[in-house]
Image (cartoon, helix red, strand yellow):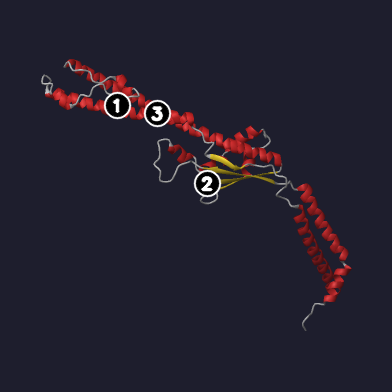
Amino acid sequence: MRKEIDLVELVRVIFNYKWVIIGVTAIVVFVTALASFVWINPVYSVRATVSVNNGLASGKPLQETDVYFSEMLTPTVYMEYIKSPQVIEEAIQKSGLQHYNISQVQSNLIVENPQNTNLINITLRGSNPSDVKEMLDAILLASKDLLLKEMKDRVKADNTKLVMQVELQKEELQQLITDYYHKANRWNLPLPFLLDSLVSDNNQYVLNLDSKYLGNQNHIPEKDLIALGKLMNEIKTSANVYRERLSKQQQLNLFLETLDIDNKIVTLSKPVEPTSQDSPDPLLNIIVALIIGVASGVGLVFLWHYWRKNLRG
């Protein structure tokens, strides 16, 4: 025979054990409220949005100094800087929040780059709203400072190498000119090159002796004429290389003096101290606890009732 559930009996069981259900529900709600308001630390979130734009137009020819922007001012690179221990450590020092450590800040820092944009969304979580806001402010400042410093260090390193190359090229040019002076004096030729004119900003030759001119010097053996022509070509080539490297060095010096990224890394949405916590949500937790408490109480009552019923049977 099929057993049927008597709804009247179910209602009677619930009514008879209503205080058990109420008690279980009250305990669950009380524990949940106590945890939400006392035991669980509140979590606050501070958000900021940063635009990273290196200012380079697609398809436009790159200048010598554009490589620093194209390689170091990208959303991907900036995201790595934001999360780096160096930036976090500097931010802790700047904010004066010495009771935080690097790993603690990193674990609560979320950095995202929406697809196909140059925007960086940064979220920092913590239990103290003012601390979280100050820390994120310091992180934004420290990341920009560190990025600018590393860019300048790279430019300085490249400039140092270029200075050495310029000096070496200058020495080579001086040696070639000295060799030409000796040969020119030997055959009583005019001295068409002056070192000052070769290394000055004007970079002009005083006189340009070509092979046609040298060909008219009948008293000079052909072998020496060839050597002189070759030497002058070497001087011209060396002077061109020297001028090119000197121009790059001057360009780097000017770039270093004017280097700034304030207009390339822009905070579109600044951190604001939160007034409400993200979690826990006491009201939501209490509502969920109320539902769970009632369900648990009813389940416990039915289990107890049918256990006793079967035991007596």
In the rendering, which numbered label is found on residue 118?
A: 2
Is 312 displayed left or right of 252 in the figure? right
Q: Is residue 161 visible?
A: no
In the displayed structure, 221 sits above or below 5; it is above
In the displayed structure, 231 sits above or below 56; it is above
In the rendering, which numbered label is found on residue 249?
A: 3
* Amino acid type indicated by mark 1: Ala
In the rendering, which numbered label is found on residue 72?
A: none
Residue contact between numbered discs 1 and 2, judged by CB atoms under 8 Å: no
For marks 1 and 2, the one nearer the N-term is 2
For marks 2 and 3, the one nearer the N-term is 2
* Amino acid type indicated by mark 3: Gln
Q: Which residue in the protein does label 1 denote? A: 239
* Amino acid type indicated by mark 2: Asn
C-alpha span from label 1 to label 2: 44 Å
Query: For the point 17% across and 27% down, which residue is it?
Result: 211
Which x, y percent locates residue 230? 20, 27
- Assign a secondary structure to mark 1: helix
